[in-house]
Amino acid sequence: MECCSCDQTAEALAATQGRVLRVVLGLNLGMFVVEALAGHLARSSALLGDSLDMLGDALAYGATLLVLRRGDLWKARATMLKGALMALTSIGVLISAGLRAWSGMTPSAEAIGAFGLLALAVNAACLALLMRHRSDDMNMAAAWTCSRNDLIANGAVLAAGAIVAWSDSLWPDFAVGVGIAILFMRSALVTLRSAATRDHGLAREAA
């Protein structure tokens, strides 16, 4: 009887976690599209870099949601896919930032500020939604930490917008966009290495 009760409790918790993850996944995916378009139209590397951060969050939440009721091998391979997509997107943002710097066009400080504030509001909402589940398990704790760290990137984007407005220079925006992309690439490589090691170990155990 106790085992049945434990199973029901675990299933109810997984269902609640799934609902929260779907909401924050939708918010981050939507904001990725909005910021990517805004970054392109406003010629802002910082907004493009922050959109990359939103995509990374969406991938993280999606991977967590996908393997919520699955085993460790599934989790390792989902993490590998997430890391690969993160790395490819980082390369795209770095190339875009380089091309924008080459063109010499100053981005729109007003757009950087407006969409930076919108991203800050979305990340704050995600943080609040994940707050009550941060102690549930390792995956939910990682999702909450990811959302919390995003507020730092949002602050950097807003600072870039303010400095661009003051200096009328493209370089603060370029520096923030490239900085976010490089940090994201580093995280992607660490994720890939960790997931590959875990996948190899689990595959050997299964054999």
Image (cartoon, grey):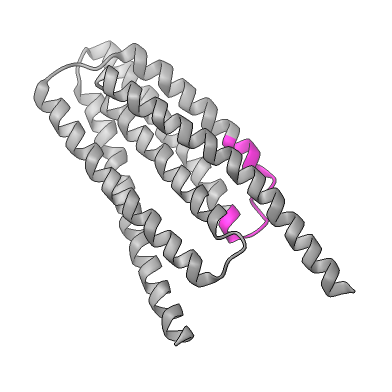
Q: Position of residue 68 (x, y in %)?
A: 60, 59
The quarter of the rendered structure image containing the N terminus is bottom right
Q: Position of residue 170 (x, y in %)?
A: 20, 21
Residue 6, quarter of the rendered image: bottom right
Image point (46%, 21%), residue name:
117
Q: Can you say whether 117 is above or below 66 in the image? A: above
Residue 167 lies left or right of residue 195; in this view the side is left
Image point (31%, 31%), residue name:
48
Image point (66%, 44%), residue name:
19
Whether residue 139 appears in magenta in the rendering, the answer is yes
Which is nearer the eye, 113 or 80?
Answer: 80
Which is nearer the eye, 14 or 173?
Answer: 14
Q: Can you say whether 51 is above or below 74 in the image? A: above
Q: Can you say whether 55 is above or below 9 in the image? A: above
Residue 169, quarter of the rendered image: top left
Residue 183 lies left or right of residue 134; in this view the side is left
Which is nearer the eye, 16 or 94?
Answer: 16
Q: Residue furthest left?
A: 102
The quarter of the rendered structure image containing the C terminus is bottom left
Whether residue 101 appears in magenta in the rendering, the answer is no
- Magenta highlight range: 126-140
Q: Position of residue 158 (x, y in %)?
A: 39, 23
Q: Position of residue 203 (x, y in %)?
A: 43, 80
Residue 75 lies left or right of residue 81; in this view the side is right
Image point (42%, 65%), residue name:
77
Q: Can you say whether 110 is above or below 158 in the image? A: above
